[in-house]
Image (cartoon, rainbow, N blue to C red):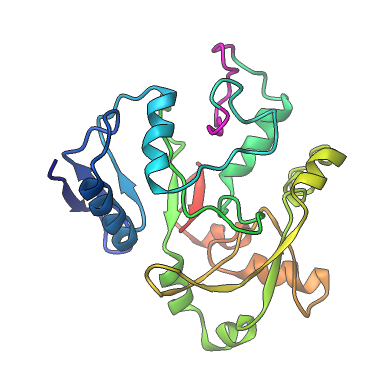
Amino acid sequence: MTIKVEPLQSALGARVHGVDLAAPVAPATRDAIHAAWMEHLVLVFPGQQLTDEQLVDFAGNFGELEVFHQKIIKSQRVPQIFRVANTDEDGKLLPPGNLTVRQLSSAQLWHTDSSYRPVPSMGSLLYGIEVTREGGETLFSNMYAVLDALPPALAARIEGRRARHDFGYLRILRDLPPVSAEEAAAMPPVWQPLVRRHSVTGRRSLYISTIYNDEVEGMSRQEGRALIASSPGSPGAMSSSTATAGARATC
């Protein structure tokens, strides 16, 4: 199977044609997709029709899959799937005040998936089953480019520092009930470098996740949170950007 990679924008993104994700993927095709991913950061596969099991099978070509630690969000039928939906698994609409819906609303803020894990995921695969016709855009940011564009003084200030990534912080940030003792034990806070070097490309990027970052190494909690809030891609910086409401992620 020969794939065609169509670049979308200079900052990131490409559309991939010529592959059926519902079918087994040959090693050469998998390698070509991986190479395109490393080059373009975000890949779009238009026109795919997948079952949950086929989605998981395709994702498994690129590594061991995570299983989310919260029962209220992960699929009960295919546990490797993290459900981003305002319905339950039987299609019943959930009320706006439902805890799952309220927690998922944190995806409207810039974030990096699973940064709160000791070994974060290498990426995410988002399959849109039913999406709104207007608004709700999913946006991505090239954090290689963000680091390159930082003012020298700010770049020097973060060099060699780490930020704490605490899953429970998003519940505080969104005025939600605290995580349970079981959830806290399963996912304790971890410290990640503010500047990371990619294991494949060798390129350095800014590594923040504003819904999880509650402290910065060597700073008071207030000072650390202010630093994160002032960083490009943070909620505080969004008012000066062209971002629209929707799910956001850093790459």
Classify residue 118 as left or right of residue 4. right
Q: Main secondary structure of the magenta part?
A: loop
User: Disc count in the image?
Assistant: 0
Give residue 189's quadrant in the image: bottom right
Q: Name the foreground residue: 99 vs 95.
A: 99
Inspect the magenta stretch and tell me whether residue 87 lies in it.
Answer: yes
* Extreme-front residue of the structure: 27
Does residue 45 lie above or below 53 as drawn? below
Q: Nearer the viewer, residue 71 or 227?
A: 71
Residue 158 coordinates in the image, percent (x, y) = 63, 80
- Give x and y (percent) for residue 6: 18, 51
Residue drawn at x 51%, y 42% as measured from the top left: 65
Q: Residue furthest right?
A: 181
Image point 63% across, 36% down: which residue? Answer: 104
In which quadrant will I find the N terminus? top left
Q: Residue 147 location, x and y as percent?
A: 48, 75
Image quarter of the C terminus = bottom left
- Relative height, residue 249 to residue 77 (above, below): below
In the orientation shown, which residue stands out farthest toward the left? 2
Front one among 102 and 59: 59
Q: Vertical placement of 98 versus 163: above or below?
A: above
Residue 230 drawn at (x, y percent): 63, 69
Q: Residue at x 72, y 24 (%)?
A: 98
Q: As drawn, is 82 to the left or to the right of 204?
A: right
Q: Is residue 23 magenta?
A: no
Q: Which residues are magenta?
A: 79-92
Asked if one can make out residue 133 in the rendered structure from this viewpoint, the answer is: no
185 displayed left or right of 66? right
The answer to whether any part of residue 168 appears in the image is yes
